[in-house]
Image (cartoon, rainbow, N blue to C red):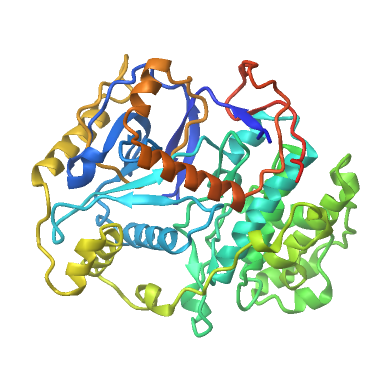
Amino acid sequence: MRPCYIELHAVAVVEENMLGNLVLTCIFAPQSSTEMEFFSEYGDANRYKIQEVIGKGSYGVVCSAIDTHTGQKVAIKKIHDIFEHLSDAARILREIKLLRLLRHPDIVEIKHIMLPPSQRDFKDIYVVFELMESDLHKVIKANDDLTREHYQFFLYQLLRALKYIHTANVYHRDLKPKNILANANCKLKICDFGLARVAFNDTPTTIFWTDYVATRWYRAPELCGSFFSKYTPAIDIWSIGCIFAEVLTGKPLFPGKNVVHQLDLMTDLLGTPSLDTISRVRNEKARRYLTSMRKKLPVPFEQKIPNVDPLALRLLQRLLAFDPKFRPNAEEALADPYFKGLAKVEREPSCQPITKMEFEFERRRVMKEDIRELIFCEILEYHPELLKDYKNGTERTSFLYPSAVDQFRKQFAHLEENSGKSGPVIPLERKHVSLPRSTIVHSKTIAPKEQQSINSLKDKQNADEASINTSRETEAIPLHLSRTLQAQQRIPLAKPGKVVGLVVPYEN
């Protein structure tokens, strides 16, 4: 079996959007492969060999690195001054907690969070993520020749992730192409859980839910004007429908300039809502606007998006039902005939619902020190021995290798000061990593000598472990796509995120 590939020649830079979430843009990779060190006080920083800066913003710095224990590429994000704004600290806590609890092949993984030098006064955290190569926004933009197999497999992965997320009682609330990471083998992973929420039956909607969620173009109708009394997982289903339509057409389906324009675009395609739907609209202004709207007939999806598999359009129409009660849940969508031959229930796991205790901080007023303690506890989840001491009341106020923390800080400071200047940035000795979502979209192939050096870091045990992990991933996520290039054929150059070669389903 030969997987499909996306040709990558640049670095996907992680940047911060208006909501404080990370997005990816593409730049050319620096030529220097010199080791950088931007970690200072964090004791396990020596485990990571810094490669280059791949992102910089108000949140801090993101670097790509090699985990010398496993030989794997990772992305390390330093988030600085996380307690400057309480809302930002709560968002970071929410995201790292959810990514610890939601372990799934189609969700981005936090591999490690570095231990701060002090429990009481730390201000920065370093989070280590798996390194992805691009995002779906870049893939859509760079490819105008995606096949039916691409369309099907992309949607299958997104719905499979959504089934897992929703059965955990979590709503993502900000799904869009830039929040879906992509690899050259067509693997997708959902990220950016900073706006996600855990739904509990006794959670007051007036406190729990807000309208300012999701980028407008992917926002469900019920989020455009507090339409319904209680939001449901259907808000994410709508977003997936918008994303799938964009994959099919190469452009956003509802690029509204404001809320009213957004509703106009929706009703231009779907027709005006039924009187029954309008009668349940809670927002009076929205109800009046929809009632006074001229009667619009729905446009056939075959006319709006021609030359597409009818089964794909039929499912898309279900995902984009104006009334959320008519949208399928993720499990029902996975059972749609569109996925015949691809979907297998045993590869579509559910998740145990997240308990109220995990997110009790969302239900009460918390102060800065409360958030600091909760974030510290999340960090200890990646340091089992110290977590055990902490729970037993024998934790230490300062930790292992204080000199390493200083070194780590120096490395990050060095990278921050020199990033963007002419010439390559030579990293200092690096020791640890932080919370980013970075990916390499277009980076030159590692030179043979350099590759041999990296491989020499792996002993037989690590190689075996990597092999096991790879086989598990392959089994969990069937890439029913293959590449037509010859095994020895050189991959042609392509734009960032460009899929190279045709793809056809694997043979079982």
What percent of the width, then of the height, locates residue 234?
66, 67
Question: In percent of the image, x 66 and y 57: which residue is there?
Answer: 159
Q: Which part of the image, by quadrant, shows the N terminus? A: top right
Q: In this rendering, does residue 320 appear at all? A: no
Q: Quadrant of residue 351?
A: bottom right
Drawn side of residue 173 relative to residue 450, left or right = right
- Looking at the picture, tell me which residue is in the foreground, 500 or 270: 500
- Looking at the picture, tell me which residue is in the foreground, 319 or 87: 319
- Looking at the picture, tell me which residue is in the foreground, 15 or 488: 488
Question: In percent of the image, x 80 and y 61: which residue is there?
Answer: 336
Q: Is residue 211 above or below residue 202?
A: above
Q: Is residue 455 above or below residue 41?
A: above
Residue most extreme to the front: 460
What percent of the width, then of the height, locates residue 184?
58, 33
- Looking at the picture, tell me which residue is in the foreground, 435 or 469: 469
What percent of the width, then of the height, locates residue 462?
37, 41
Question: In percent of the image, x 52 and y 57: which residue is there?
Answer: 104
Drawn side of residue 45 relative to residue 319, left or right = left
Drawn side of residue 299 relative to residue 471, left or right = right
Question: In percent of the image, x 67 and y 43: which residue is there?
Answer: 479
Q: How many marks?
A: 0
What percent of the width, then of the height, locates residue 183?
56, 37
Q: Quadrant of residue 163?
A: bottom right
Q: Quadrant of residue 100?
A: bottom left
Q: In this rendering, does residue 422 appear at all? A: yes
